[in-house]
Image (cartoon, rainbow, N blue to C red):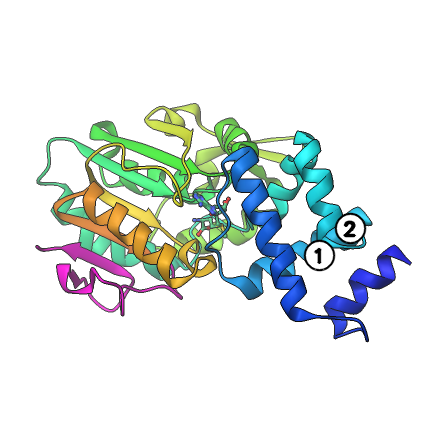
Amino acid sequence: MKRGTASEALAGAPPSYDPARERLEIELLLEGVFRQYGFDFRSYAYASIRRRLWKHMVEAGLPTISALQERVLHDAAAMDRLLLDLSVNVTAMYRDPGFYQAFRREVVPRLRTYPFIRVWHAGCSTGEEVVSMAILLQEEGLYDRARIYATDINEAVLQQARTGIFPLERMQEYTENYIRAGGTRSFSEYYTAKYDGALFSPALLANIVFSQHDLATDRSFAEFNVVVCRNVLIYFDRTLQARVHGLFYESLATFGILGLGSKESLRLSPYESRYEPLGATRLYRKVR
Ligand SMILES: C[S@@+](CC[C@H](N)C(=O)[O-])C[C@H]1O[C@@H](n2cnc3c(N)ncnc32)[C@H](O)[C@@H]1O
């Protein structure tokens, strides 16, 4: 009854269910993953990591977290599969179009004053958000002097991102997002349809560097005018959020811009007083 055991735990508490033991097993698994592979999920929000572990186990047909630990510690391919499930990669082009509209309005005029612009997209997933930004900067005449560093913990999504190919069936949705984000051209100018993929113009990828970076363990690697990290911090606990805010603060030049997701903010972060909000969106300017 392998599947039954995991499903029961997802649905509710089976008679032998012991939350303290489950938590211990999860902590041991995450400690093992960190020591064996260097991926540090120990400070992710517990409820969300628990849910994703159980989902993974149901799909892998594993009865207990300890069984998952046994498998993952001995099999790097099993770790790759687990990583895919732990690192929720949901993304979209021009996700929350209002963010990009505000970016054009509030940030672009400031960027025009710089001879060279460095942007960091942290937790970029398969790259949709990064290509959205590249298009925006190109339309504003800023792309030629921009360099975008796009990072993620997950090498598999970065490989996908480097291809510049996104699902063709989502182009209708992305076109609508693009228009709502303030885009004025014909969105289809930017890609060519290839089988079931939309291949974005190589010129748009020319100034983007994709590389692996773990926000939980790695350090800052350059000074940026803009840091965008959207829909990533929601998965972290308070301690890890504070670490990452420290990393972004260190990485931003004075008057640099921080862009967060719609459910994220600097409120209650130790760095709140170092920034001022730009309008009512999730854009902040480092002021001290
Ligand atoms: C929900 S996606 C958000 C993608 C994109 N920023 C957006 O808003 O559409 C979260 C991304 O964060 C990445 N991520 C999770 N933990 C990370 C970490 N410790 N360091 C870097 N990236 C991480 C995941 O791999 C995933 O691609």
Dividing the image into 4 quarters, which one contains the C terminus?
bottom left
In-front residue for pair 104/17? 17
Position in image of residue 16 (x %, y %): 80, 71
- As drawn, the label of residue 55 is 1
- Asked whether residue 268 is drawn in magenta, I would say yes
Give the magenta range.
261-288
Labels in figure, total = 2
User: Which residue is the site of mark 2?
Assistant: 59
Dividing the image into 4 quarters, which one contains the N terminus?
bottom right
Identify which amino acid the numbered label 1 is placed on.
Lys
Element under disc 2:
helix
Does residue 196 show up?
Answer: no
User: Toward which corner of the image does residue 3 lie, by quadrant?
Assistant: bottom right
Asked whether the residues under the numbered discs 2 and 1 touch, taking CB atoms below 8 Å apart as contact, a structural biologist would say yes
- As drawn, the label of residue 263 is none
Position of 14 relative to 230 (above/below): below
